[in-house]
Amino acid sequence: MSDRSRFCANWVTEHMLRSTAFLVTAATVVTVVVGGCATTPDVDAATQGAATYRELVDALYGTAEERLAAEAGSSAVLQQSIVDCMSGMGFSYTAAASEQLTGGPIVLGDLTSLAPLGEHGFGITSFKQNVAKAADARSNTGYTALRTEADRAAYGAALGPCITAAPDVATFVPDGQGELSSELEKLLGDQEKSPSAAVKLTAYGDCMTKAGYPVRDFLELYQLVESRFPDPGAGWKVMESDVRWTAAVAFERTAADVDSGCRSDLHTHVMSAVQPELARFVERHAAAIAKVRRQWSEYRATAAK
């Protein structure tokens, strides 16, 4: 790729990613010409389709920060219930920290064409690290301060019922999200099942297998990479010194690079083909999308207080 072509491609990507008025721009097919640079229709449509898809995911499922805040909120309610229950039985219980499980990229329906390419990896390293650090922070001082087996047995006997009695707290879900998400996932799933996309999905599997990764789709690759990581339940202090951790982190990075090279054609094809449908989806559900987005914003503001 020439420097000029690279500049054009980068400009289009940044222009689309930074656009905040996606409800307007997504419904309009725009030809981008900058300083004599013109992108191909497929790349233009794919860039716009990918940007609209990401905006829709953030609108329906919340940004990473909003999802983490929702997870932390439900975890805090659950843990406080255990604290109160144990206190009522004469014991001290230290609330466990949130494991931050929900901050990674969202891939609707585990569709291969929708997974983020290269630059974001798969989010497995940060996911495992967060769980391990939460395990380290889960030191229950009320229990560790006990000195006799009888006291520890009594503590355990009280803790079990308190955990069982804790409310099943659902993470925040905005009204209307489910219906929109189901329709969007079907729309995208149907596109990936089209004959032209199916050929490219098969080619992706062949490319990955040839590169040493015997997988046929993104979910299989994700599971393969995740299987290389040690158990984060042992805690971060233990896991970071485990040779399997270092190897797994490197394996994820390499796999993400290979995946990006093998999958870019499928990703571009599907995003280009689905772009008009995404634009119509946004136009058709503009009010409902805005309502869900507003609920996430209000929840974030409430959680920050």
Image (cartoon, rainbow, N blue to C red):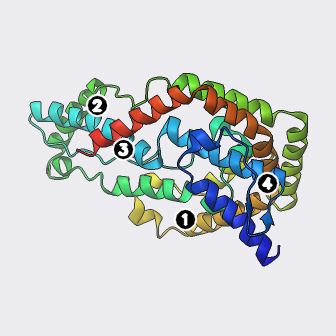
Say what amino acid the circle numbered 4 marks: Val
On the image, numbered disc 1 is attached to which residue?
245
Q: Earlier in the sequence, mark 1 or mark 3?
A: 3
Q: Quadrant of the C terminus?
A: top left
Give left or right: position of 125 versus 95.
right
Q: Is residue 88 above or below residue 50?
A: above
On the image, numbered disc 2 is attached to which residue?
163
On the image, numbered disc 3 is attached to which residue?
69
- Which image quarter: residue 260? bottom right
Q: Which mark is residue 195?
A: none
Q: Residue at x 79, y 57 (%)?
A: 213
* In front: label 3 or label 4: 4
Under circle 1, the secondary element is helix
Q: Is residue 115 above or below residue 194?
A: below
Q: Residue at x 59, y 29 (%)?
A: 181
Say what amino acid the circle numbered 1 marks: Trp
Residue 182 in sight: yes
* In front: label 4 or label 1: 4
